């Protein structure tokens, strides 16, 4: 079940960020959405650390790293 929720959440975040960036990436609402996405990806990272590290399947152990690095890239893209 966690796979489905994380997958849908990641697709939704990607679509929203793509749409906001396409429309106007300098707007205040765009910056707010980037920050909310940053926070949400870090929350997913914490959840994955608590649940995924108990399983010996390698991709589950990589999820927190991928979520955190993605959130940092979104934040850097917002300010650069």
Image (spheres, rainbow, N blue to C red):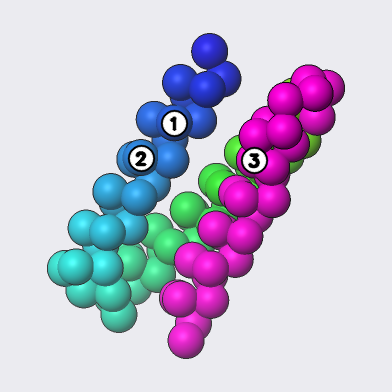
Q: Main secondary structure of the magenta part?
A: helix
- Which is nearer the eye, 75 or 7? 7
> In the picture shown, does residue 19 fall above or below 50?
below
Please name the residue that numbered disc 3 is placed on. 63
Q: Quadrant of residue 49?
A: top right
Please name the residue that numbered disc 2 is placed on. 11
Q: Is residue 47 visible?
A: no
Secondary structure found at label 2: helix
Q: Are marks 2 and 3 in contact (CB under 8 Å)?
A: no
The residue depicted at 47 percent of the width and 24 percent of the height is 5
Q: Cα distance, mark 2 to mark 3?
A: 15 Å
Q: Is residue 48 left or right of residue 3?
A: right
Viewer-nearest of discs 2 and 3: 3
Residue 37: x %, y % from top left: 48, 53
Please name the residue that numbered disc 1 is placed on. 7
The residue depicted at 56 percent of the width and 59 percent of the height is 71
């Amino acid at each position: 079940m966690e796979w489905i929720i994380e997958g849908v959440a990641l697709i939704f975040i990607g679509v929203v960020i793509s749409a906001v960036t396409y429309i106007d990436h300098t707007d205040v609402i765009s910056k707010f959405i980037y920050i909310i996405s940053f926070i949400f990806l870090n929350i997913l990272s914490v959840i994955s650390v608590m649940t995924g590290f108990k399983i010996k399947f390698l991709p589950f152990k990589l999820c927190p790293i991928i979520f955190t690095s993605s959130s940092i890239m979104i934040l850097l893209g917002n300010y650069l």
